[in-house]
Image: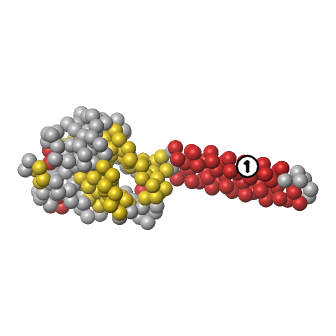
């Protein structure tokens, strides 16, 4: 039975190695182009702004009301952009991203960037009014993975300076997992398990920071190639076990 035992041991070791790789490798869900995310409930602005459909990446985004009211600043639902922090953008419609930005300055190549609107309806844009020329990164969004469940979802938050940013729902269940405030341009991470959808909340106007605390973010999931690698190891091991049985039946290695 030595040969068969060796094959089984190799199979288990192979799975362990691939599982470690699977956990370590991650794929960002941030589209690698600048533009506006196509929300399920608010149309893109249009004009020169690229409208990004995320369904091909396996998820949709729905904006939700962010109804904080502080110092006379009332916010409605926010839009969501993809931004490359090292480039300036004058998108029109009252939205301008500067370099460096007045608020969040992450080091990643591309990030999700909320654009807060005043309480008037952003669907009415261009008559709607983005707060701070689009630079107030405040919002609340539902990410839905279209019936798929990820074993692990990692979310990086950039520039959390008030106790209101974090995850407030996972799989339609309230969790209210909020992050502690940090120094300017800090990076914090939350890892969620077995996720089919989540609601993320970002920034606040209820802050000593003027005019408010904004947060950009990144969402990562395990690389699909890691799953294929695990399947390949499993298939190879099964073939090896079949061969070992044939050899064992012939009296080899028994």
The quarter holding residue 185 reads top left
Side of 245 where 153 appears, left or right: left
Q: Position of residue 242 (x, y in %)?
A: 79, 59
Q: Residue at x 77, y 54 (%)?
A: 240
Left or right position of 124 against 112: left
Asked if residue 166 is positioned above or below residue 40 in the image, the reply reads: above
Left or right of residue 233, residue 108 in this image? left
Taking depth in this image into account, of 31 and 177 the one nearest to the observer is 177
Does residue 42 show up? yes
Residue 213 position within the rendered picture, expressed as x and y whole percent measured from the top left: 21, 43
Q: Which residue is mark 1?
A: 9
Residue at the spot 19% in from the left edge and 51% down from the top edge: 116
Residue at position x 22%, y 49% in the image: 138
Q: Nearer the viewer, residue 21 or 94?
A: 21
Picture coordinates of residue 170, whole percent (x, y):
37, 59
* Mark 1 secondary-structure assignment: helix
Q: Nearer the viewer, residue 181 or 104?
A: 181
> Residue 204, image x and y in percent?
20, 48
Task: Check the image and name the residue furthest to the right.
Answer: 251
Instruction: Answer whether residue 105 is visible to the viewer in this image.
Output: no
Vertical comparison of 42 with 185: above or below: below
Q: Foreground: 41 or 212?
A: 212
Q: Quadrant of residue 96?
A: top left
Q: Kindly identify the residue that appears in the image at 34 percent across and 35 percent down.
A: 107
Q: Residue furthest bottom?
A: 147
From the viewer's perspective, is 196 left or right of 13? left
Name the colouring of the figure: secondary structure
Identity of the residue furthest to the left in this view? 72
């Amino acid at each position: 039975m030595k040969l068969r035992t060796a094959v089984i041991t190799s199979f288990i070791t192979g799975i362990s190695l691939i599982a470690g790789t699977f956990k370590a490798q991650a794929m960002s869900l941030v589209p690698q182009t600048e533009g506006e995310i196509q929300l399920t409930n608010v149309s893109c602005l249009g004009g020169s702004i690229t409208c990004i459909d995320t369904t091909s990446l396996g998820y949709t985004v729905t904006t939700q009301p962010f109804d904080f009211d502080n110092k006379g600043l009332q916010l409605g639902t926010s839009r969501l952009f993809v931004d490359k922090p090292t480039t300036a953008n004058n998108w029109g419609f009252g939205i301008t991203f500067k370099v460096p930005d007045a608020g969040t300055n992450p080091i990643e190549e591309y990030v999700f960037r909320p654009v807060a609107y005043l309480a008037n309806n952003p669907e009415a844009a261009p008559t709607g009014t983005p707060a701070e020329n689009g630079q107030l990164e405040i919002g609340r969004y539902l990410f839905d993975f279209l019936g798929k469940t990820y074993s692990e979802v990692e979310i990086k938050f950039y520039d959390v300076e008030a106790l209101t940013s974090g995850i407030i729902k996972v799989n339609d269940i309230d969790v209210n997992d909020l992050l502690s405030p940090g120094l300017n341009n800090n990076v914090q991470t939350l890892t969620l398990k077995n996720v089919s959808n989540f609601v993320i909340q970002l920034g606040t106007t209820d802050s000593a920071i003027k005019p408010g605390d904004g947060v950009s973010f990144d969402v990562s999931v395990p690389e699909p190639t890691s799953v294929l690698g695990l399947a390949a190891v499993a298939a190879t091991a099964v073939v090896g076990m079949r061969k070992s049985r044939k050899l064992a039946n012939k009296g080899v290695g028994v």
